[in-house]
Image (tube, grey):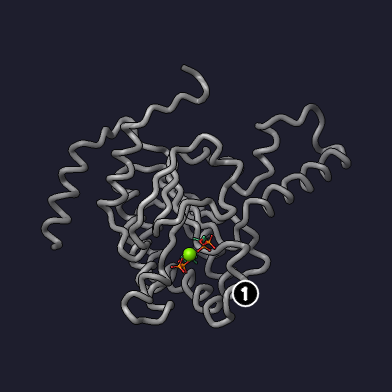
Amino acid sequence: MENSLEEREKELLAKIDPERLPGHVAIIMDGNGRWAKERGLPRSAGHRQGVETVREIVSCSHRLGIKVLTLFAFSTENWKRPAWEVNYLMSLPQQYLKKELPKLVEENVKVNLIGDPSRLPPPVQKAVNQGLEATRNNTGMVLNFALNYGSRMEIVRAVQGLLADIQEGRHKGPVTEEVFSRYLFTAGLPDPDLLIRTSGEYRLSNFLLWQLAYSELWFTRTYWPDFNRCHLLQAVYDYQQRERRFGKI
Ligand code: IPE
Ligand code: IPE
Ligand code: MG
């Protein structure tokens, strides 16, 4: 099994054009609960296995030369889940960073956060801040976690920020798309070139609505805990077969 994964990886790597990689890959990591249910396990087991997938995909993206990897880890709507599940999900960033941060620092990966951190439990805020601080000067891949992220919340906050800056004279001149983008959590990051969603759901679930305007979308029925580097490479290969026209002919 492992062997054939390696062979497949080699095949895909040989087909991928390193000059035309998607600069920014965004992933809606979905299907942890159903993965667990199919195995008669608690949903938390799916989330735990999902963290292993995060490790594999971060490492593969980094080796491939992806510049920005955005992972949707917790949405503003996910607070509606039962308290035990929210608590479990909230324990994962610390767990992940505790184990991975030294490697991320060493590999020149820069951790970034999009979303509203103020509602995150203080230990999560602390762990995330440590991650941001420890990798602040890194210049390699940006590993961008969407935590308590919702696109509509982001857009409303951007409008509020912009209005305040106009009223207080900090912003003068026209409000262009470029100006508006600077008020989003993703300020300074390029828009995703490729969006991946796992688990056979075909929706955006309030993720990066502005930023995904011209992204290529790639869906798989595979649940996130079963997603591996070959799925990622396949998505990148498929992306390279698409023609991006941006409205032109
Ligand atoms: C993705 O898996 C993890 C988060 C949304 C945080 P789910 O927990 O949504 O798994 P399903 O969709 O119920 O299978
Ligand atoms: C989207 O998955 C959010 C994350 C992956 C963090 P959900 O499982 O919450 O999405 P819906 O509710 O099925 O649309
Ligand atoms: Mg889901």
Whether the residue under disc 1 has CB within 8 Å of ligand 1:
no
Q: Residue at x 20, y 43 (%)?
A: 12
Number of numbered markers? 1
Q: Amino acid at mark 1?
A: Pro
User: How many other residues sit within 10 Å of disc 1, few (<14), some (14-19) or many (≥20)?
Assistant: few
Looking at the picture, how far across and down is residue 84, in whole percent? 54, 82
Left or right, residue 194 beside residue 207: left
Q: Is residue 15 left or right of residue 109?
A: left
Q: In the picture provided, is 122 more to the left or to the right than 240?
A: right
Q: Is residue 241 above or below residue 229?
A: above
Q: Residue 51, relative to residue 197: is it above or below? A: below
Q: Is residue 87 visible?
A: yes
> Of 142 and 196, which appears nearest the observer?
196
**Percent from the top left, x then y, of residue 6?**
15, 54
Front residue (pair 15, 184) = 15
In the image, residue 65 sits, relative to residue 157, either above or below, namely: above
Q: Position of residue 232 (x, y in %)?
A: 31, 49
Return the x and y of residue 69 as percentages of the image width and height: 43, 49
Task: Answer with left or right where residue 139 lies relative to residue 158.
Answer: left
Residue reaching furthest to the top: 249
For the point 28% across and 57% down, which residue is it?
228
Label 1, secondary structure: give it: helix
Q: What residue is rendered at 36% in x and 70% in y?
A: 35
Which quarter of the picture shows residue 32? Answer: bottom left
Looking at the image, which is closer to me, 65 or 248? 248
Pick the residue in front: 223 or 20: 223
Q: Is residue 138 at least partly visible in the picture?
A: no
Q: Which residue matches tag 1?
A: 122
* Residue drawn 50% across the image and 19% down it: 248
